Amino acid sequence: MLQYNKIIFVSTSDTCRGPVAAAIMRSMPDMEDTQIISRGVVSLFPEPVNPKAVAVAKGNGIEIGDYQSHQIAATDFGTNTLVLVMTDIMKKQIYDTYTEAVNVYTIKEFVGEVGDLEVPYGGELTDYGSTYEEMRRIIEKIVEKIELSK
């Protein structure tokens, strides 16, 4: 049975994929009792979300607001916390860095898919849109998996 009261989406700098994924999941039905946040593996100081990611999210009815990036920390992990990273390299990096790390999966691995969720950084707005659509599809599967296990 999957009982998570906190879900953390982890991306490189917490300025694109992570905050957008968290915002998408927070907008899903039945997720209001779960704390959903994002973190970065390399967030040395607070930064805003990439403007292209904000625009794509807003175009899909998702508000990011004035979110500022945060670094993942040892205190973020726990047995009731699900940590979803964007790439297999990030998963390895987290397990290598934090002895407290548990329940860490790539976002695709958690739903039985293979591969990484690539960063659209530097791409066109359409690249950000494609990443958004892929994230939304995967997050819908994550919510379904969590709901089915309750």
Image (spheres, rainbow, N blue to C red):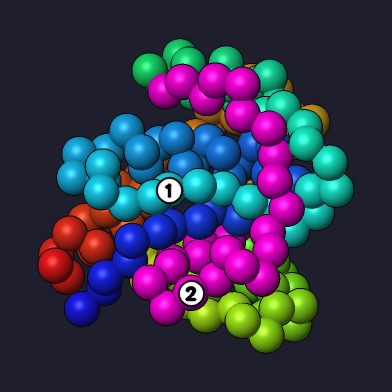
For image coordinates 52% across by 80% down, the residue present is: 102
**Residue type at mark 1?**
Ile
Foreground tag (2 vs 1): 2
66 vs 112: above or below: above
Residue 52 is tagged as: none
Please state, as top left, top right, bottom left or bottom right, where the C terminus lies in the image. Answer: bottom left
Question: For the stretch drawn in magenta, what is the main secondary structure?
Answer: loop
Q: Give the left or right position of residue 76, taking residue 40 as reference.
A: left
Queried whether the magenta region covers residue 110, the answer comes back as no
For image coordinates 66% across by 71% down, the residue present is: 74
The image shows a total of numbered marks equal to 2
Q: Give the left or right position of residue 47, taking residue 75 as reference.
A: right
45 vs 60: above or below: below
Q: Give the left or right position of residue 117, taking residue 140 as reference.
A: right
Residue 104: tell me if it is visible.
yes
Instruction: From the top left corner, tell me how far across and down residue 38 is, in percent.
Output: 56, 48
- SS under mark 2: loop
Q: Residues within 10 Å of mark 2 (few under 14, many from 20)?
A: some
**Residue type at mark 2?**
Gly
- SS under mark 1: strand
In this orientation, which residue lies closer to the viewer: 74 or 110? 74
Name the residue beneath numbered marker 2. Answer: 78
Name the residue beneath numbered marker 1. Answer: 36
Q: Quadrant of residue 66?
A: top right
Q: Quadrant of residue 88?
A: bottom right
Look at the image and give the residue range highlighted in magenta.
Answer: 62-86
Asked whether the beta carbons under mark 2 and mark 1 sit within 8 Å of each other, the answer is no
For image coordinates 56% across by 39% down, the residue present is: 19
Extreme-front residue of the structure: 75
Q: Which of disc 1 and disc 2 is earlier in sequence?
A: 1
